[in-house]
Image (spheres, coloured by chain):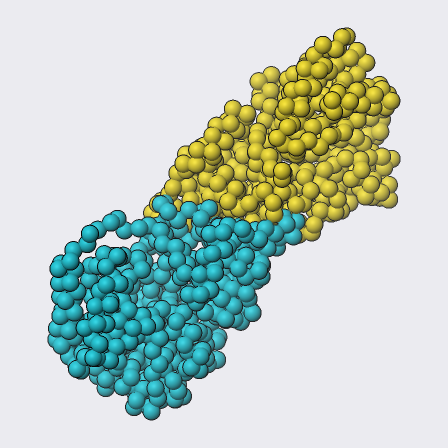
């Protein structure tokens, strides 16, 4: 079977195989029908299939009577902020986020700027499958697509309101940034300049291909790490293709695990103001340890940004995010926004006067391993079901089925779940040592293969 | 009579009603079929300004890009501009998004081959097979290319016409022209060409916003505003385009429409006077053209009806001028396409050289007495009607290459099936308007009689 994922994260597939113009146009018609027409914003990241997919989406939205506003290449969080600002009824981000260049996806945003939640995503899917879409007649169809080039400025204003800009400017931090030639190149260098930073930008060309997988992980960050060392930067940032995930390099040039982005953001945030922290079941247990220092509760959700966003609003959280490098700063918006995370981190560096490595050293010493098992799409859920039955009788463990199956021992945990975006089962394990984490992952892998 | 269909998929492209059958998925699939047909090469696209144009354009872009095509986008422009640029840019094909003279709820894709001609019947059939097979080329996402915009396409087109014909000769007083662009694709290109030629230009209905200020067909009954403007401005001529600026009708300085049938006759008389050669037109076009050609010692070759047939025959015959009686002028030194811009340039050069008003030039031409009728005829009876005409006229001169054309005493008539409606189209020409009317009425009466005598099962 070929890769195509239709679910809560939107519609995602490999262009040239499963992700066709008909699919994109059909989903756009379904989304427009679901919204009952109205103004819809569209943006894309820089991957080469973006113009094709955007055209298909625009055709579908127009055919269903929407007023389409094209934002061009901007980060997804920029679109999300612009949806309520421009009184739009929804938005479509054409981006496969952290996936390689051959992929693309549609992410559906509702009127408040957040992603459709899982109930809404299912309703949208029902409309798509039913195939009965609104059809605008010639006298109702929009005869042109509107364009807006002021949404990045609007995003910058919102970012600046959440940060002590003068304090950061006063320090004139040197900052290295790798935009991965993605949509962040349209936002982040401007943001860093507004913060008075001495900016060393690489891969900031919107027309160039991704220099590496657009997924911030230590193995995609050696270039940024080298730039930090060579330039003597205070910090380095590495982006995905659409501005949700953020990877960090400390001032020594060490690329940090993407799990630490949220942990560091939470530590900084709770120092200022204690309050609930929202993250998913798969994210590092360091979050609990950090929250405990401040007496703050941690809310764990299923994996997926829509769950994080809803829980942030429900619990009045002060910070939220996921272990993939996604951080939501509620003062900016209740959704992952790497530029908002940058503001938080730089404000801390500027006001504390301490290097990033010092903050990292204070985090609990935990080791996480992330592996996966490729599984055909037709047997992913039966494989997971068998796994759950196999581990339910295990003694001395706690089994959490919020999302997939998480097995918790006193000294570590392993989380086994279907990927939202690819045809695989992910195995995430965490413990106090690499050996113990690897042992937990192996334990799960053995039981998956039975 | 059955309901009029809202979708027509055939060898000449796909045409349908927006908000009904012409959906983005259907359009994207057709574009994918065309992208597959041209092997993912370079494709030139342009559109007319009807309200659904943006939606259709977006669907076409998505379909073409998904097959790996490199798109050159001309934006809103005349259909002949697309055809010209296909050849100029050595593209592998083109798509014009236009339903030409059809009402505003319609839109369509017209497919252009690498030679700048609309796809022939055979190639149209190949494209249709690919569409129906549904096995389209799928380019890798990481290798797709962005759309290249060519906002200068209209200038290229105007430049090509100026290069071929030159500006109008210097005169004491420049020719004054009123243009009615029907708020169509010629709204920008038309005035630009007229000014480049050196004519004083007054444009009406020249806001390309997809509104239809009049029915798009430049037939005399739709040109009241233009005729009035010609009189009011004391203009030397009036020109009317259709929505995609391929067809042209002329209004004389008196404010009288001269009739679409004359457009090609006027253009041909100018071309033959300066560069004698073969003329190509379709079977349904006025024989006044033969008289004009005969005066210049030139011959007329007749093809089946349709731009692709005429242009194809022009290529084979190395014709110097050609076109169709609906106002479509094809001038190969510029373009193998029906082109209202070329038509305007030729007519104005004729007027400038003749030093006579349009009405005087028309009066000196062989007269056109031609009528067009539609006769209801169920589609399953059309074959029998045509066969009976051939049988009853076995002793007359008959051309059965496209319907049945019969030469009678001082005239001729042609009966052709419609490919969109349960009717036959009847054209008759004779020595006077009355005689042409009588001929048409007699043929229509005979057909109706045959249908009544053996009603449909």
Specify the colour of chain A: yellow
Relative to B457, residue A384 above or below: above
**In which quadrant will I find the C terminus of chain A?**
top right
Q: Residue furthest top?
A: A396
User: Could you say where residue B412 lies in the image, as x and y percent from the top left?
Assistant: 21, 77
Point out residue B1 in the picture as x, y percentages from the top left corner: 21, 51
Residue B58, horizontal then vertical, whole percent: 49, 51
The quadrant the N terminus of chain A occupies is top right
Q: Quadrant of residue A425?
A: top right
Q: As drawn, is A148 to the left or to the right of A159?
A: left
Is any atom of residue B391 visible in this view? Answer: yes
- Write down the quadrant of residue B448 in the picture: bottom left
Residue A328 in the image: x percent, y percent?
Answer: 65, 28
In this rendering, position of residue A331 left or right of residue B319: right
Residue at 48% of width from left, 53% of height from top? B131
Which chain is depicted cyan?
A: B
Q: Nearer the viewer, residue B396 or B21?
A: B396
Q: Is residue A64 above or below residue A310?
A: below
| Above-or-below relation of A20 to B336 | above
Which residue is at a point 33% across and 90% down the rendered structure image? B296
- Give the total number of marks visible in the rendering: 0
Vertical side of A182 occupied by B254: above or below: below
Looking at the image, which residue is at 23% across and 56% down?
Answer: B378
């Amino acid at each position: 079977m070929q890769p195509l994922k239709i679910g809560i994260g939107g519609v995602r597939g490999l262009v040239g195989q499963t992700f066709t113009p008909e699919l994109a146009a059909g989903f756009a018609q379904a989304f427009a029908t679901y919204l009952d027409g109205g103004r819809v914003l569209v943006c894309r990241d820089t991957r080469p299939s973006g113009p094709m997919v955007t055209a298909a989406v625009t055709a579908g939205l127009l055919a269903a009577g929407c007023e389409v506003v094209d934002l061009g290449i901007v980060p997804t969080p920029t679109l999300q902020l612009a949806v309520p600002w421009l009184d739009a009824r929804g938005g479509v981000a054409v981006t496969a986020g952290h996936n390689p260049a051959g992929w693309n996806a549609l992410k559906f945003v509702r009127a408040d700027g957040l992603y459709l939640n899982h109930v809404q995503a299912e309703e949208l899917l029902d409309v798509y499958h039913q195939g009965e879409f609104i059809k605008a007649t010639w006298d109702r169809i929009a005869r042109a697509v509107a364009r807006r080039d002021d949404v990045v400025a609007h995003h910058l204003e919102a970012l600046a309101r959440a940060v002590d800009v003068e304090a950061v400017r006063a320090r004139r931090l040197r900052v290295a940034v790798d935009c991965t030639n993605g949509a962040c190149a349209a936002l982040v260098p401007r943001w860093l300049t507004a913060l008075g930073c001495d900016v060393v930008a690489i891969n900031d060309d919107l027309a160039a291909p991704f220099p590496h997988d657009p997924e911030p992980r230590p193995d995609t960050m050696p270039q940024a790490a080298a730039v930090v060392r060579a330039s003597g930067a205070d910090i380095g940032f590495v982006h995905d293709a659409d501005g949700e995930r953020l990877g960090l390099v400390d001032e020594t040039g060490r690329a940090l695990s993407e799990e630490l982005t949220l942990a560091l953001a939470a530590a900084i945030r709770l120092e200022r103001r204690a309050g609930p922290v929202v993250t998913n079941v798969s994210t590092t247990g360091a979050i609990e340890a950090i929250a405990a220092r401040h007496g703050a509760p941690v809310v764990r959700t299923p994996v997926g940004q829509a769950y994080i966003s809803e829980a942030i609003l429900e619990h009045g959280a002060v910070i939220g995010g996921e272990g993939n490098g996604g951080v939501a700063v509620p003062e900016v918006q209740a959704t992952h926004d790497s530029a908002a995370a940058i503001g938080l981190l730089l404000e801390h560096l500027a006001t504390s006067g301490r290097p990033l490595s010092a903050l990292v050293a204070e985090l609990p010493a935990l080791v996480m391993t992330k592996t996966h098992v490729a599984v055909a799409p037709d047997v992913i859920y039966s494989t997971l079901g068998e796994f759950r039955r196999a581990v339910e009788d295990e003694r001395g463990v706690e089994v959490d089925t919020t999302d997939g199956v998480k097995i918790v021992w006193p000294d570590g945990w392993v989380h086994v779940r279907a990927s939202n975006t690819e045809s695989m089962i992910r195995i995430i394990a965490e413990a106090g040592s690499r050996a113990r984490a690897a042992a937990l992952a192996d334990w799960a892998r053995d039981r998956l293969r039975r | 009579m059955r309901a009029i269909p809202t979708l027509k998929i055939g060898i000449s492209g796909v045409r349908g009603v927006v908000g009904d059958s012409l959906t983005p998925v259907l359009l994207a699939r057709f574009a994918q079929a065309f992208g597959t047909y041209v092997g993912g090469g370079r494709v030139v696209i342009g559109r007319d300004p009807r309200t659904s144009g943006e939606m259709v354009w977006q669907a076409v872009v998505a379909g073409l890009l998904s097959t790996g095509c490199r798109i050159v986008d001309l934006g809103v422009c005349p259909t002949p501009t697309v055809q010209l640029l296909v050849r100029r840019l050595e593209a592998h094909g083109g798509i014009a998004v236009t339903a030409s003279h059809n009402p505003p709820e319609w839109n369509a894709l017209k497919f252009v081959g690498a030679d700048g001609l609309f796809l022939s019947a055979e190639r149209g059939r190949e494209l249709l097979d690919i569409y129906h097979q549904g096995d389209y080329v799928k380019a890798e996402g990481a290798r797709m290319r962005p759309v290249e915009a060519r906002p200068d396409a209209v200038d290229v087109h105007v430049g090509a016409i100026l290069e071929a014909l030159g500006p109008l000769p210097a005169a004491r007083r420049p020719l004054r022209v009123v243009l009615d662009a029907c708020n169509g694709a010629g709204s920008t290109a038309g005035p630009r060409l007229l000014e480049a030629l050196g004519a004083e230009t007054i444009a009406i209905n020249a806001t390309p916003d997809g509104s239809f200020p009049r029915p798009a067909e430049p037939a005399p009954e739709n040109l009241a505003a233009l005729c009035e403007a010609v009189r009011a401005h004391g203009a030397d001529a009036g020109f009317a385009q259709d929505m995609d600026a391929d067809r042209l009708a002329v209004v004389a300085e008196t404010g009288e429409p001269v009739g679409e049938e004359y457009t090609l006759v006027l253009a041909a008389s100018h071309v033959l006077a300066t560069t004698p050669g073969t003329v190509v037109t379709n079977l349904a076009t006025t024989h006044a053209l033969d008289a004009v050609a005969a005066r210049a010692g030139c011959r007329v070759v007749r093809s089946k009806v349709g731009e692709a047939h005429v242009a194809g025959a022009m290529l084979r015959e190395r014709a110097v001028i050609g076109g169709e009686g609906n106002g479509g002028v094809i001038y190969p030194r510029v373009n193998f396409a029906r082109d209202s811009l070329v038509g305007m340039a030729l007519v104005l050069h004729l007027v400038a050289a003749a030093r006579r008003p349009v009405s005087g030039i028309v009066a000196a031409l062989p007269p056109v007495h031609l009528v067009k009728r539609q006769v209801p005829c169920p589609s399953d009876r059309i074959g029998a009607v045509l066969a009976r005409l051939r049988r009853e006229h076995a002793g007359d001169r008959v051309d059965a290459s496209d319907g049945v054309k019969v030469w009678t005493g001082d005239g001729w008539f042609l009966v052709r099936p419609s490919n969109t409606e349960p009717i036959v189209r009847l054209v008759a020409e004779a020595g006077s308007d009355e005689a042409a009317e009588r001929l048409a009425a007699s043929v229509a009466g005979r057909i109706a009689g045959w249908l009544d005598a053996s009603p449909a099962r």
